[in-house]
Every structure is written in C-alpha cells, then in structure tokens.
Image (tube, grey):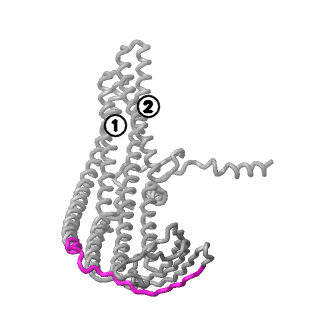
Amino acid sequence: MKNKYLLLLLLIGPYSVKAQNLDLESCLKMADTANLTIRNARLEIEMNEKQIKAYKSAITPKVTFIGDYKYNAIIPGQVVPAAFFGGTPGTYSTVQFGVPYNLSNTIQLTQVIYNPQVNYALQALALNKKIVEIQEKLTVQDIKQQVSSTYFNLQAMSKQIAFLTENIANMDKLIANMEAMLRAELIVETEVDKLKINRLNILNSKQTLTATKDQLETLLKILIGMDSSKTITLVSDEMIQNSILVDKETISHPELEIIDAQLQMNTEERKGTNLAYLPSLSFYAAYNYAYNMKPEDDFRTGIESAFLGLRLDWTLFDGLEKYNKQKVNAISREKIANQKDLVAQQLQLATDNAQKQIGIQLNSLSISKEQLFLSQKVYKQTEAQFKEGIIGSNDMITAENSLQQAQTNVVSAYIQLRQAELAYLKSIGNIK
C-alpha cells in the first residue's frame, strides 16, 4: 500500500507544483525567447542570410533545358528570286521550307565571367544584414522596456490594492464599533452611514484597480510568451530606493548604428552606380537536337547543332540615368547625415532628462514615504480619538482620505522613479 501511495505522489507531483514566482529578470529572459515580436525580428535575420545565399547561387553556372515541339499546320514560306531556280529575272516565287513536325531539344550552359554589379550587390546584402541585426537589437530593447514597465506597474497596483485592502479592514472594525455604539443609542445612525459610504468608495477603488491589474497581467503574459490560462505570480518589489541601474557605464546606441549602416549603404549605392558604366561578360554553350518528320512521305531526320559563345553587354549611353541617380544619392546622403545629428541630439536629451527625473523622483519617493508615515500616525491618533468619542465621523473620514492619498503618492512616486530609470536605460541602449 505504501508503494502505491508513493507511486501516486510521483504521478501527480508535476501537476501539484505551485505557480512559479517571477522576478523581473525571469520575465525578461522569458520574453527574450518566447516573445513573438522578438522571434519575428530574429526570423528576419535568418531570412536575410538565406537571401544572401540565394543571390550567391544566382551567379553560379546555370544549366537550362528547352523543349520546343511544333506541328506546322501550314508550313511557313519564304519569298526568293525566281532567277534562283532558272526563272524570269525580276520575278519572285514563294518556297516552303520545313516539314509539318519539328521536335527541338536544347541544353544550355551559362556562366557569368565578369559583372561589376555582383560585388556591389553582395556588399549591399551584407550591409542589409547588419541593419537587420541592429533592428533586432532595437526590437529587443523595446520589448524589454515594455516588459519592465508592465512589471513595475503591476507591482505598484499590487501595493495599492494591498493598501486599500488594509483600509477596508480598518474601516470594517470602525463600522463594527460604531454599530455597537448605535445599538447602545450612544450615536445617531448617520455617523455609521458616513463610514459605510466611505467604505464603499474604497471598495469601488479596489475593484477598479483589480480589473486594471488583471488586464496588465494578461499583457505581461503576452509579452513574455506565457500561456494566458496560467496563473502569474510576481516576486514583490519593495517600494524602496533600490535602483535598477545596475550598469550605467555600458552605452549602446543601435539607432545611430542603423544610420551609420545606412550611410555605408549610400556609399555602396554610389559605387554601384559608377560600376554600371562598365560592361559585363558572360560565357554560354548550347547543344540542340531537332527531329523533323513528314509522315506522308515517311521522311524522318535528326539535325544536331552546338555552339559556344561570349556575350558582352555594355550600355554606351543611358540618357543620363546614372548621372541623375548620383545626384539623388548625394541628396540622400545629406539627409541621412542630418538625421544622424538629430537622433544623436534626441538621445542625449533623453538621457539628460531621464537622469534629472531619476533625481527628482528619488526625492519625491523619500518625501512621499515620510508623508505616509505621518499620515499613518495621524490616522491612528484620530482612530483612537474617534473610538473614545472625542471627534466625529467627519474627522475620521478626513484622516482616512489623507492616509489613502499618502498611500497613492508613495505608489505614484515609485512607478515614476522606475519609469525614469527605464527611460535612462533605454536612452543608452542598456535594458538587460
């Protein structure tokens, strides 16, 4: 019996494990492997690599087969001078050449020997690969910022809901005491009703926050690639001045890297346009076997042919097409350079503003915590006086509202601090 019991525990064990508590690091790791947007960005890199291989394959030798099977319902004719057959000079006769059935099979080999556009295209594909890889880095940073922001918002809401739950519990105790005093006819019913109204307001706020929290949890599940049917539990992030700025020295600006790659692409385009002035050379060889038939004369014969050749393509005048392309290229380069300067200024501004906000929000969080401490102290004193009948319900409700506002201020300062830190890390490309 004992062995059967152990076997049963082993069977149900995997299904009885509690939901894993996720911290921010775990959420970011899950997003890095399961987020669909990130996965698509990496598929884009893979697709670009396949495109490079496809292009390289396009410049290898090509062998083609052409089959042409014709029935000449009317055999085509050719006009020739009648004198060719001993006729009257200056007159012409129509002569039909060929037979009704013609079966032609051709195998051809083609190989590019020199094409100035090939190197340009390969270089452009390599640069495009670089751009796609940098875009993947930007995508990862954006998703990690979304995950972190959602995570901290959930932390803030959980703390706010905890505050409201505690406030409701305190209000329930007060209402219970007041109802006892009402039964003893020591107070009027209005005093109890005021507290009940305030309790309903707090309860409504809690329900609203709970609904919003559920929506955020669903969003976080989507961002980290978690099954929506599973329960998500987050490790509590105490609302203290612990910073997420664990590495402020590593700076990466993928936005500028992309623009640098675009400048390189612009340079390669200019080179490619210049190379288009040069000719291209290719080798080709073909073998053909044509089988001709005329059944009514029992005529059948096969004719072989083969040839080797070099083909030179050279555009001597293109109507100033390449000249105008170079003009467009120069303007495009100036625009890209201006964009780089603008983005660099914007990133620096974002970094400076985020640093200032971090300092402001740190101070705000410290002040809010002090306000909360004092509000809790005032609330306890007011509660004691209220129970002794020294003050009325209006004063009690005022103290309750002040406490709730102080709680909200702490939560707000916490989330603003975290958002400022995220903005700073995003501006230096260092959300990990």
Q: Is residue 66 above or below residue 418?
A: below
What is the residue that sits farthest to the right in this orientation?
Answer: 1
Residue 106 screen position, x and y as percent? 52, 78
Q: Is residue 306 magenta?
A: yes
Residue indicated by mark 1:
376
Question: Amino acid type of disc 1?
Answer: Gln
Instruction: Tell me the residue at 30%/23% (across/down).
Output: 394
Nearer the N terminus, badge 2 or badge 1?
2
First to last magenta residue range: 300-326
What is the residue that sits farthest to the front in this orientation?
Answer: 88
Mark 2 neighbour class, 10 Å CA radius: few under 14, some 14 to 19, many 20 or more: few
In front: 154, or 401?
A: 154
In front: 333, or 81?
A: 81
Do labels 2 and 1 touch, CB within 8 Å? no
Residue 248 screen position, x and y as percent? 32, 64
Assign a secondary structure to mark 2: helix
Question: Amino acid type of disc 2?
Answer: Ala
Q: Which mark is residue 76?
A: none
Q: Is residue 17 above or below residue 81?
A: above
What is the residue that sits farthest to the top in this orientation?
Answer: 185
Assign a secondary structure to mark 1: helix
Residue indicated by mark 2:
169
Q: CA distance from mark 2 to mark 1?
A: 15 Å
Instruction: Tell me the residue at 33%/22% (across/down).
Output: 393
| Residue 88 visible to an observer of this rendering | yes
